Image (tube, coloured by chain):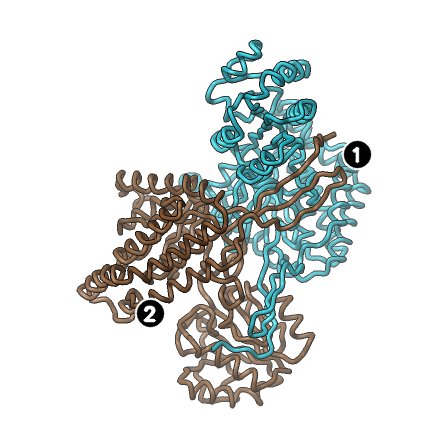
Chain colours: A cyan, B brown
Amino acid sequence: MSETKAKIDPRMTALLRDIGEKSRASARELAKVRPELKDRALLKMADDLVKKADFLLSENRKDIEEAENKGLQDSLIDRLTLTPERIEKIALGLRQVASLTDPVGEIVRMWTRPNGLRVGKMRIPLGVIGIIYESRPNVTADAAGLCIKSGNAVILRGGSETLRSNLAIGELLRDALRQCGLPQGAIQIIPVTERSAVLEMLKLDELIDLIIPRGGEGLIRFVTENSSIPVLKHYKGVCHVFVDESADLDMAESISINAKVQRPGVCNSMETMLVHEGIARDFLPRAVKAFTDKGVRIKGCAKTREIAPEVEEATENDWYEEYLDLIMNVKVVESLEKAVEHIEKYGSMHTETIVTENYKSSQDFINSVGSSTVMVNASTRFSDGFELGLGAEIGISTTKLHAFGPMGAQELTTTKFIVFGEGQIRQ
Amino acid sequence: MSETKAKIDPRMTALLRDIGEKSRASARELAKVRPELKDRALLKMADDLVKKADFLLSENRKDIEEAENKGLQDSLIDRLTLTPERIEKIALGLRQVASLTDPVGEIVRMWTRPNGLRVGKMRIPLGVIGIIYESRPNVTADAAGLCIKSGNAVILRGGSETLRSNLAIGELLRDALRQCGLPQGAIQIIPVTERSAVLEMLKLDELIDLIIPRGGEGLIRFVTENSSIPVLKHYKGVCHVFVDESADLDMAESISINAKVQRPGVCNSMETMLVHEGIARDFLPRAVKAFTDKGVRIKGCAKTREIAPEVEEATENDWYEEYLDLIMNVKVVESLEKAVEHIEKYGSMHTETIVTENYKSSQDFINSVGSSTVMVNASTRFSDGFELGLGAEIGISTTKLHAFGPMGAQELTTTKFIVFGEGQIRQ
């Protein structure tokens, strides 16, 4: 780490400091802006992205050509490709963010002290947020939109393979800010691809209030290890479905299938199904068949394989695995407590669900599972900001400080105390 | 830093890891405990501290003797001294914490999605909290009490000069936990004085969720620079009183005097008074006299000295100063905006108050000052957890992430999402 740092170019230090200072100044201005002005700018951004789609597509084309020349995988090229439909979807996202309630200025609580002081907590923006992400250029607009909505300035650092696309999107967004009388510096795209730019960014703890990395585990670890700024982390999603003894078997099958196969490549899909031993003989044969029919490869514990011998043997490491694919584990457990113990040991504090018809089991599961989202009789796939009703999502935190679970606009704010007196002094 | 780390003793690593693991296991247990059990333990702690005061006083006596032999300053020795009255006060603090509403399990909000899913946010403990503090042995009980109340395990590391007192207090608190059927490991005192113990503690990012340093700027910087665990920081309190053009002059005098002299050595006392130029000629002569009568040394800007020539000249550095003493700065400003700019530049985001009879000024000040506590017509001295109605205080955060301003039991919790479904799956 110190070696990497030693190589840093002083021009890079100056570039990032300049970006940080403009961001800080813009954040001060933006914090005082009325909700309607921010929403107007967000709608203008949405309109302009669609109107100027040709410009975006031609810049994106250059990124794609470079990626093809470099021989990047097709799946990666697909991720970085913009299409008119994808641009429409980005614009729709910005319009939805505009329609959300503005979190800034909300008085969360207010109370009166015995001496007559009225004390409240008021929501205010965090200030400057740095987003470090990979590939998908839609993140540029999605993240910028949520930051502006919540009154924050944002510094965006996307993947090197989408630099031109990100700069083009940034240009349109900044232009919309300017035309609506808001500070352009509130959205800035780091215009260089060197990794040292990230290291310089992560040093600006007096100018940036929060770093959100979005991408693979490698990116997140790199950011965490090198940042002097607080980082909101989301390592991985090892999500569980626990089929309780009293589960409705049709519901258990429908929820676990949905949790695994509806979109296996995302963090809120199920990796391990836990089955109460009291119901295993009834449920496992039909479940294994249903999963196999959907093309899912199943690894299981000894008890699972006793009931369904076609299941492969799971190794100790498999229980920790985030497959992100049509592969899953199945384990038979003696009790709800054992299911919770398994989740505590192997889980990633993301999302777990119980399928049960029993009142006590539902309460016990909700109360004793410490993950960021705990569900009863619902698919783990609902664990994202939009589906849970936050309107949009900037990421999912699997660490507890500041925010835990899906983060929307409100999670990009903090609160200050406000106090109204009539001349009170302390005795 | 790496040099310091290289010196670390492997036995110290093992000791701290053991403490951390016990703490994590106890936190899991404590998170599930009913409020009444925690409150019973807190009341038992309070009773036992008073009942066994002789034991505490005799252990404290040994700390005092050692401090005297080392030639410590009288003021420091006073800070570490326990008396029967001080023990009563510690017990009273624990009883007050017991009487607070339990934050754990509170459903902060709950809403229903179009598909019928009921989604809520439930308060849960953070987990394991590390407190690193100096001198005053009362912090041992105060901090432990708030952590237990909020369902967290706590690892306490006090100053080396109070180790015996802290261990004695810890012994009583742990015994009360045990007698009430709660895990003793939920309160642990680091039993060694070496600084390397702190470094080892700050590495345990998988076992400790939050570090709160309480003490001087040096301690806080040391902790921040060496911690891989999130730190809630409170650097300093450079608090301002702004006397607006429309202020009631009697109120302005009473509030600013109270803010400066009622207890000058604490972070929420005033360091700089800003006076609107429209009222400076009326207010400054009487204010300067009132402060001088109280023995306050005043440094001022050129305009202040024009009106009150007896005031010393303030240097640029003085405006940043946290005097913690009967010394203050006075500056005449052209407008409320200029006052806010001064606060943004020289302040520490702690506490600022405006004295005004004007509605617009009061709103503008509340909205545009970004500090953690912003007041109208009240003394800055009210800026602490107890006075603002949080019941007790674990510290004051002057950084925005997770908590900003005075922190009570609620700030030692986070929220998880809970979801109640009826078999919903994602389309």
The label number, if any, that marks residue B85 in the structure image = 2
Real-space CA distance between mark 2 and mark 1, rounded to the nearest whole angstrom: 75 Å
Residue B314 location, quadrant: bottom left
The image shows residue A187, relative to residue A71, as above or below, that is: below
* Residue at disc 2, secondary structure: helix
Residue A290 position, x and y percent, is 67, 16
Q: Residue at x 47, y 74 (%)?
A: B271
Question: Between tags 2 and 1, which lies in front?
Answer: 2
Considering every residue shown, the one lying at the far left of the view is B69
- Label 1 is found on which chain of the structure? A
Q: Residue at x 30, y 47 (%)?
A: B197
Q: Nearer the viewer, residue A137 or A320?
A: A320
Residue A248 position, x and y percent, is 67, 25
Residue B171 position, x and y percent, is 30, 52
Q: Nearer the viewer, residue A14 or A4?
A: A4
The tally of labels here is 2
Amino acid bearing label 2: Glu
The image shows residue A333, relative to residue B115, as above or below, that is: above
Q: Which residue is mark 1?
A: A84
The image shows residue A88, relative to residue B199, as above or below, that is: above
Q: Nearer the viewer, residue B39 or B311?
A: B39
* Residue at disc 1, secondary structure: helix
Residue B358 location, quadrant: bottom right
Q: Residue at x 55, y 52 (%)?
A: A208
Amino acid bearing label 1: Pro
**How dense is the environment of label 2, judged by Cα within 10 Å: few (below 14), some, or many (20 and up)?**
few
The label number, if any, that marks residue B132 in the structure image = none
- Label 2 is found on which chain of the structure? B
Residue B145 location, quadrant: bottom left
